[in-house]
Image: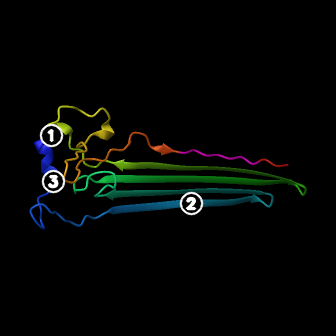
Amino acid sequence: MLKGLNFYPEGNISRSLYASTQMLSNDSDQGGFRFDHNFSGGDQLFLRYATAITSQIDPLSISGANVPGFPVGDDIRTHSVAASDTHRFSPGTIHTFRAGFFRNMFLFDKRPNRTPPSDLGFQYQPSLALSSGPPFLIVSGYASVGDPITDRGTPTRTPTSSAIRSR
């Protein structure tokens, strides 16, 4: 437990007051393509794919430690696919097929700090690999230290689909 106290920085303003500026890191990438093809005057194909990825490292988690050293990471990934095929059989008959897929994946509060609890004098091993890191410690009268207490084991996935059929 005494090793856990080493996470508390020494005061730099007074003996018991510490202040610092921490930098948040945010990276975003996106891309996609669109393909249109006219096979003939009555047969058209359209395809589209788009993706976006955002990754952020926050040095001070809103649900975790109040001192530097316990950053959390958030990742958001999005994929979108759309396809459409239109075929004219005769001047009065047109067939249109449309399909789409959209997927968001959210992974919040990832732990970049992987200090095992055994390095701090604790005699246990985390049961989940994602939970390896210093435990969350609250010392009365001081700031909390350690990784945030949140569920990181299961990414959130929300698949959706729709179909429209008309005559």
Seen in the picture, residue 15 relative to 165 is either above or below; the reply is below
**Which residue position holds label 2?**
33
Helix, strand or loop at label 2? It is strand
The residue positioned 19% from the left and 53% from the top of the image is 142
Residue at 36% x, 62% y is 26
Counting from the top left corner in percent of width and height, residue 107 is at 42, 48
Give the number of marks: 3
Q: Which of marks 3 and 2 is nearer the N terminus?
A: 3
Q: Does the magenta stretch include residue 163?
A: yes
Which of the two discs, 3 and 1, sits closer to the camera? 3
Q: What number is the disc on residue 8?
A: 3
Three-letter amino acid code at the position of disc 2: Phe
Q: Judge left or right: residue 144 versus residue 81.
A: left
Q: Which of 17 and 43 is in front in this view?
A: 17
Marker disc for residue 119: 1
- Which residue is rendered at x = 29% and y = 57% of the image? 60
Which region of the structure is painted magenta?
Answer: 158-164
